[in-house]
Amino acid sequence: MPISRGGRYTLENVVPACPSCNASKHNNEVTGWLRRKHLDERAFLLRYATILPTLLPAG
């Protein structure tokens, strides 16, 4: 959930994006934005699931 709509400011919730993409996404959820832009939502989610564990503290 976007921070602007009450989402938490955590690694699990924040999606890095370039300024242009971030402005385009505005306060929409990333999956809805990906669909609207006709981007590969499945590829994004698989990559996100691969990278996220390396960012989180062990434990």
Image (spheres, rainbow, N blue to C red):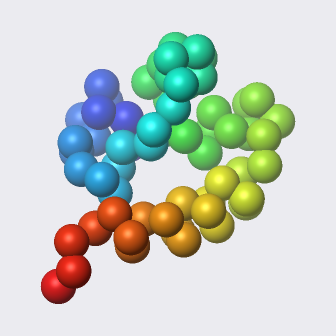
Decide if residue 15 is on the left or right side of residue 21: left
Q: Looking at this rendering, what residue extends furthest in the left direction?
A: 59
Q: Looking at this rendering, what residue extends furthest in the right direction?
A: 38
Decide if residue 56 is on the left or right side of residue 45: left
- Position of residue 53 measured from the top left corner of the image (x, y, whole percent): 39, 73
Relative to 3, is 14 above or below?
below
- Residue drawn at 34 percent across, 63 percent down: 55
Relative to 48, is 5 above or below?
above
Relative to 33, is 10 above or below?
below
Q: Nearer the viewer, residue 48 or 5?
A: 48
- Residue drawn at 28 percent across, 41 percent down: 7
- Position of residue 52 measured from the top left corner of the image (x, y, whole percent): 42, 65
Q: Quadrant of residue 46?
A: bottom right
Q: Quadrant of the N terminus?
A: top left
- Residue drawn at 58 percent across, 15 percent down: 20
Q: Quadrant of the C terminus?
A: bottom left
Q: Quadrant of residue 27?
A: top left
